[in-house]
Amino acid sequence: MRYFSAQYIFTNTGAPLKRGILTTDDDGLILKVEDTGGRLNDRALLEYYNGIIIPGMVNCHSHLELSHLKGRTKRGTGLGNFIEQIRDLRGSDDKTIETAARQTDRLMSDEGVVLCSDICNTEDTFSIKRNSRIKYINLIEVFGIDPSKAEKRIEEALWLKQKSEEYGIPCNIVPHSFYSVSLTLLRLLKQTGEKNSLTSVHFMESSGEKDFLIEKKGPLAESYIRSGLMPPAPDTVRNHSAGVMEELTSNGNLLLIHNTFADKETISEVNSRNNTFWCLCPGSNLYIEGKLPQVKLLIDSGCKLVTGTDSIASNDTISMVNEMKILQQSFPFIKLADLVEWATLNGAMALSATDTYGTIEPGKRPGLVLLSDPDLENLKLLPGTYSKRLI
């Protein structure tokens, strides 16, 4: 058995425990949670940390297979240009892709990620995930603005889904976004993924998405034209709300990714769908568009918030704590307990994994993570705060 304590323990089941004690078996199963009332007595074998212990973190949006593009894309070019960069740069030899992805997986795990929903366009990372300490859910992502190629895109996705299942990794087939998927393809995806336990879609990530959906104009249209991908008569959903409410499966949980330009009307309409989670990836938002979502509006609207890192191709780090720092700095009214909850419990809820993850309580194996060098007096993250996995 092992015994853990820290200045504070955030269990996500009640108020933070001051100098509480956690008892686990050697495999990380929580056996006992003890509230000492802040009075910690000497105990043999106790591992004490001058920081904050939280449950293992849940990364609700990543692109592990893009790890080899770290530092190769230009910051602040806007979504259309960023997608062009990814399209031009992502091809590489298998060894380079695997090495970079393995390093990213190890880094996420060492910093405390225990569960991750990861976007996949290839099988490049499947062998890494099968042997990782992180439990992955693969989201097989489909693109295709040309309706004439819709059936081919479905065939490709079904093949990749079969590969994921062969590796024993849970998976769902999902659309990339409403601006990158024709209505024909979106409706085929709804049929294919009707029983999805989890669906995700990149949502209102750029200001140009509305222009493209409504008028087929703007920076995204220009990007398609430059790349030779614009069909003669593009057919898309009429708006983001219609996309969610009419063209996605109503089964399972839904992750709306980014939400940088989500407005009050859209948020209100979409929130009527049950089991919808709004994923914040602030580091990526600043990297691509230089703008953050209206987080206060999302909170005031009753949105269930979760956190993701996106890929290292569109971020300076792959650190969940860095995402929390950005949110705290930009929205100082947000309490640390809420940031932790978004990055742990809410993520576990979104990925239907609260039987194991999200809270520190007997009978669970949530992982334990230490937040080192925080402001313990005010319960805030500091610029130098970092995380490491304890178990």
Image: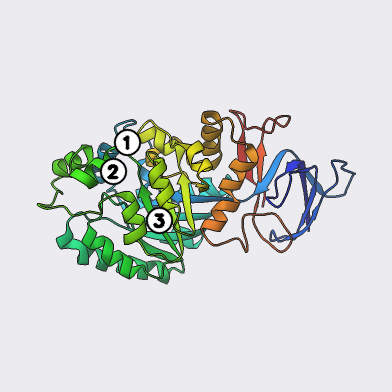
Q: Is residue 72 above or below residue 178?
A: above
Q: Amino acid at mark 2?
A: Ile
- Identify residue for label 1: 73
- Identify residue for label 2: 86
Q: Amino acid at mark 1?
A: Thr
Q: Secondary structure at mark 1?
A: loop
- Left/right placement of residue 48 relative to residue 107 reads right
Residue 120 in percent (x, y) is at: 37, 56
- Identify residue for label 3: 200
Query: Label 2, label 1: how many angstroms apart (C-alpha)?
Result: 8 Å
Query: What residue sits 62% from the left and 62% below the top?
Result: 356
Query: What residue sits 65% from the left and 41% below the top?
Result: 337
Query: What residue sits 13% from the left and 46% below the top?
Result: 228
Q: Are marks 2 and 1 in contact (CB under 8 Å)?
A: yes
Query: Label 3, label 2: how many angstroms apart (C-alpha)?
Result: 20 Å
Residue 194 in percent (x, y) is at: 37, 69
- Left/right placement of residue 239 relative to residue 380 reads left
> In terms of depth relative to the viewer, which is nearer, 128 or 257?
257
Residue count near mark 1 (Cα–Cα under 10 Å), binned few <14, some 14–19, many ≥20: many
Of labels 2 and 1, earlier in sequence is: 1
Q: Are marks 3 and 2 in contact (CB under 8 Å)?
A: no
Quadrant where the N terminus is found in the figure:
bottom right
Which colour style is shown?
A: rainbow
Of labels 3 and 2, earlier in sequence is: 2
Residue count near mark 3 (Cα–Cα under 10 Å), binned few <14, some 14–19, many ≥20: many
The residue lying furthest to the left in this view is: 232
Residue count near mark 2 (Cα–Cα under 10 Å), binned few <14, some 14–19, many ≥20: some
